[in-house]
Image (cartoon, grey):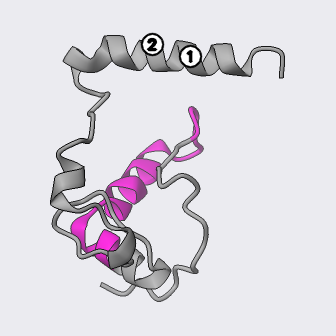
């Protein structure tokens, strides 16, 4: 896979975002799927010395990679069972930003 055309840029907060009404929605989905693929993530980590959330991609910055013992403490807020904790965290964030 040739990813030489990708310039090292900030990946923001390490997330992928898409406009709600892109001009070419299928192209945007194809790009996001490619960007999150194992090979593209491996290339991205090498190019940016960044780490992927994928477990099948070697870290680009091993010193910043989560060790297995730290991974065990990760809370998956997407899981339905954790939704109340997620909602509480959002409310706490909103309350802390009130008036700013």
- Residue at 38% over, 83% down: 46
Secondary structure predominantly adopted by residues drawn in magenta: helix
* Disc 1 crowd, CA 10 A, few/some/many (<14, 14-19, 20+): few
The image quadrant that residue 51 belongs to is: bottom left
- Is 66 placed left or right of 32 in the picture? left
- Residue at 33% over, 64% down: 52
In the image, residue 39 lies in the stretch drawn in magenta: yes
Residue at the extreme front: 69
What is the span of residues highlighted in magenta in the rendered image? 19-42
- Element marked by disc 1: helix
Q: Position of residue 17 (x, y in %)?
A: 52, 45
Give above or below for 88 relative to 17: above
Label 1 belongs to which residue?
Answer: 92
- Is 6 placed left or right of 71 in the picture? right
Which quarter of the rendering shows the N terminus?
A: bottom left
- Element marked by disc 2: helix
Given residues 29 and 36, the one toward you in this image is 36
Give above or below for 54 relative to 88: below
Residue 88, disc:
2
Q: CA distance from mark 1 to mark 2?
A: 6 Å
- Residue at 16% over, 67% down: 56
Given residues 63 and 7, the one toward you in this image is 63
* Disc 2 crowd, CA 10 A, few/some/many (<14, 14-19, 20+): few
Give above or below for 97 relative to 74: above
Q: Position of residue 83 (x, y in %)?
A: 31, 15
């Amino acid at each position: 896979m040739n990813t030489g055309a990708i310039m090292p840029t900030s990946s923001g907060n390490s997330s992928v975002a898409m406009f709600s009404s892109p001009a070419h929605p299928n192209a945007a989905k194809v790009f996001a799927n490619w960007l999150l693929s194992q090979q593209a993530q491996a290339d991205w980590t090498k190019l940016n010395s960044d780490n992927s959330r994928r477990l099948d991609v070697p870290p680009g910055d091993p010193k910043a990679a989560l060790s297995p013992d730290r991974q065990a403490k990760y809370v998956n807020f997407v899981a339905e069972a954790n939704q109340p904790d997620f909602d509480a965290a959002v409310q706490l964030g909103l309350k802390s930003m009130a008036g700013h």
